[in-house]
Image (cartoon, rainbow, N blue to C red):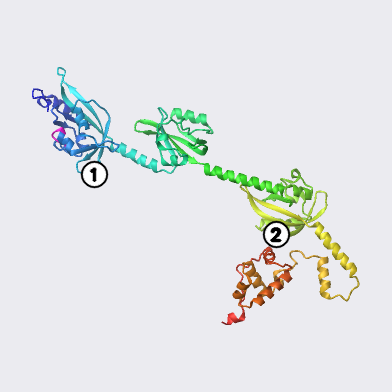
Amino acid sequence: MADASFKSLRETADLRHLRQIIVGLDEGVILIDPDQSLLWANDAALAMHGVDDIADLGATVDEYRARFQLRYRNNHRVGADEYPIERVVAGDSFSEVVVEVTVAGDDSPRWVHQVRSLVLNDADEAEPACLVLIIQDVSARYEAEDRFEQSFNANPAPAVICRLNDLRFVKVNQGFLEMTGHQRDQVLCKTVYDIDVLRQAERRDLAKERLAEGRTIPQMEAELELPEGGTRLVIVAGQPIDMGDQPCMLFTFADLEPRRKAEGALRHSEERFTRTFQMAPVPMAIGARDGHLLCEVNASFTALTGYCATEIIGRPLGEVELWESSAIREKIEAAIDGGHDLRGHEARIQAKDGATIDCIVSTEAIRLGDGACVLWAFQDITQRKATEVELVEAIEAVMKDTSWFSRSIMDKLARLRAPRTENDGPGLDDLTPRERDVLALICRGCDDKTIARTLDVAGNTVRNHVARIYAKIGVNRRIAAVAWARARGFDGEGVALHRSEKETAA
C-alpha cells in the first residue's frame, strides 16, 4: 500500500477530468491508484472483462488477480507478479503484452487482450499520481490467426511462409516437411535462399523481382534440393499475405516428382521398345490408326520391301501401293478401322522393284505417347508357297492318267493345287455340335476329365472327339487347337453346351 502521506488521485479533481476524456474511447482503460486500488474503468474495459461495474473487476489489484486468470499465448500461466496490472503498479513501462483472459472457474479463455501501461505524474511530484492500464481486445484477430494456423497445418498441399523484411521462414506445414524430408527446426528461421524454393525455376529472375516487391509470384517449375541429396521437381507459386502487422509471402507447391518418374519410366519403356523394334528379324512397321500413315519401319521391313524409312514414313500405305491390289488394302484397312486386329492374314504385297511377295500379316493396336497406332508384322511365305506349288506339280506329273486313284486323294491334290484361304479353309462349321462343345471347353482350359464331367460322357468319348477335331483342323496339340479357334473368333466363352441325353433326362 502507498504511504499515508501520499496525495491519492481519488482526493483530487483530476480523476473526474480523466474520466471525461477517456469515457468514449474504443480502447479499454483502467485507472489504478498508487495504493493498488482500482479507481475507475471505462465501458470498453468493463465489456472486455464481461462485467458491468468497476466493482466486478475487483476493488484492488489482488481482487482483480483472483477473479481473472491470465496466460500467455504459448499456454504458460502468467505469474502473480507478472500480471500487467501488477507490473504497472510496480512502475514497469511496457507495451503490447498479449495475454489470454479467463474468468476464474472457467476452463477456457474468453478474450485475448493486448495491454500497455501509462504512468501519470504530477508536475511537481516524483511519485506517480495515477497508473493507467490500456487494453485492446484482439480476440477476433487471434481467432482468425488460429483458424489460419489450423488450416495451414492441415492443408495437404506443401507450403511455407516467409517474412518479407528479412525473407526468413516463419511457418512450415507438414506437407512441405513430408515432401522434402526437412525437419521443422531446419526450416524455421532459415531464409528463402538457404532453403532455395526457387532453385532452377523457369523464371527465377521474375520470381526474385516479385518477391522483393511483395507481389504475386506466378506458377513455375522449380527443383527443390533435398537434405539427403537429390532434388524434387515441383510447381511453386507465391502469394503475398499479412500475418499480424508483418507482410509475408506464402509459397505453395505441387509435387511433380511422381509425374517425372512416370515420364522417365515411359521414356525408358519406349526406348526399349524402339531398340527391340529395330533389331527384330521380322519385318515390322508402325502406322497411325487414323489415316494409316506409316510412322516407323525397321531394317527387316526395308530388306523385305526395298523401301527405306525416308521413302515410306509419313505416307499412307495406299499411296505407297504396298498392297498388290486396292481391294486387299481396303479390306485390311476396313478391319483395322472397325477395331479388329489381324492374325495370320494372308495377303500379297509389292516390293519397290515391283516383285510380288506372299505374306502373312498380323497387326496389334498400340499407343505411342498420346497417339493410337498400329504395329504391323509381315512374314514372307513366298518361298514356302513356291515350294508347295512345285510339289503339287510334281505329284500331278507322276499321277497323270492314274484314274484308278480314289476321289478323296484327288480332292486332297486339288486342295494342294489351290490352297484354301483363311475364309475357305477348315472352319467351325466343319465341326459337329458335340465337337464344338469339346473345343469350347478346351479353349476354357479344361482337361479331358473335366470335359467328360461337364458333358456327362465317358472319358474315351472325349478323347475320340479331340482326335477327330485335331484331324479336321490339322493340329496335333491342345495349344494349337486353341490358337486355331481364337484366330476364328471362337474362345468358348458364352457357348451354350449341349449335355448328353442321360443328363437332360435326369
Residue 425 located left or right of residue 195: right
Whether residue 305 is visible: yes
Label placed on residue 107: 1
Q: Which residue is mark 2?
A: 343
Residue type beneath disc 1: Asp
**What residue appears at the point 63 percent right and 68 percent down from the top-left corner?**
492
Residue type beneath disc 2: Arg
Question: Residue 25: horizontal and vertical position, in percent?
Answer: 22, 30
**Which residue occupies the foreground of this view, 418 or 331?**
418
Which of pointers 2 and 1 indicates the residue nearer the eye? Answer: 1
Structural distance between the alpha carbons of marks 2 and 1: 79 Å
Q: Is residue 469 above or below residue 146?
A: below
Query: Outermost residue toward the top?
Result: 124
Magenta span includes 317: no
Quadrant hosting residue 387:
bottom right
Give the main secondary structure of the magenta stretch: loop
Label placed on residue 26: none
Magenta span includes 60: yes
Question: Residue 418: horizontal and vertical position, in percent?
Answer: 82, 65
**Which residue occupies the foreground of this view, 128 or 390?**
390
Query: Outermost residue toward the front?
Result: 228
Mark 1 residue element: loop
Whether residue 25 is visible: no
Specify the segment rendered in magenta.
57-61
Query: Outermost residue toward the left?
Result: 4
Crowd rating for badge 2 (residues with CA inside 10 Å; few <14, some 14–19, many 20+): some
Q: Is residue 504 above or below residue 413?
A: below
Mark 2 residue element: loop
Q: Is residue 122 above or below residue 429?
A: above
